[in-house]
Amino acid sequence: MPKPAIRLPETVDEAKALKAWASSQDDRQRPASPLQITKHLTFLAATLPSKAQDDDSGKMRFAVYSSILSEYSNDALAYMARRACAELDWFPTPRQCLALIDQYRPPISEKDIALSLCHQFFQGRFEDFISDLKLGLATQDLVDAVPLKWRQIAMEQGYLRWISEQNQYAIRRKVLSA
């Protein structure tokens, strides 16, 4: 599916196309590869002092850290490594690594921005619909064209009424007082 412009839609068709594109996007962060985990741990080891270990202990330590960190994205691990170097005096414990990762907030994705813009567009259209009902500018064709949920809300707000014989929502006309 071609990527539409990520901007506030101007038409319903643009909004639908943007929403369809956004819904097709997979914005889940992929777990870091073993090589990426190794690079972050090597960076930490080169920067922060730690207790001296023999080769077997070092391999065991790497295996434990890799196992614990394997579900996190490369970006989350990069964040953790930068924060550890800036804030800690010693190589972090697994608990410290996880505490730093818990503070990581991924950037807002294009998918989230697109969905927010679609919501903003449809919210504006809904508000225009309610405004037209309030001002007496709405037509029955407009009422019939909007989503059912909008009609239900407008009825709850007193702008529409349900006519069961016609199986339709109708505009509630204001009663003029004498």
Image (spheres, helix red, strand yellow):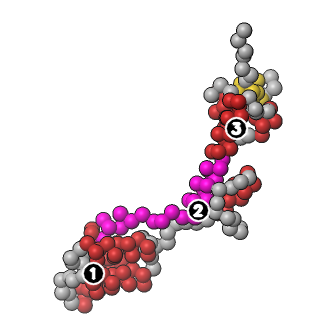
Q: Return the disc, 3 or 1, that comes first in the chain's sequence.
A: 1
Q: Which residue is at the far bottom?
A: 55
Q: Residue at x 71, y 69 (%)?
A: 2
Residue 110, image x and y in percent? Answer: 58, 64
Tag 2: amino acid: Lys
For the record, the magenta segment spans 97-122
Sort mark 1 into few (<14), some (14-19) or many (20+) by Cα contacts within 10 Å. some
Q: Is residue 171 above or below residue 71?
A: above
Residue visible at 67% across and 62% down in the picture: 21
Q: In this image, 87 relative to 30: left or right?
A: left
Q: Nearer the viewer, residue 170 or 71?
A: 170
Outermost top residue? 178
On the image, numbered disc 3 is attached to which residue?
A: 129
User: Which image quarter holds the N terminus?
Assistant: bottom right
Q: How many marks?
A: 3
Location of residue 155 by image quarter: top right
Residue tagged by mark 2?
A: 111
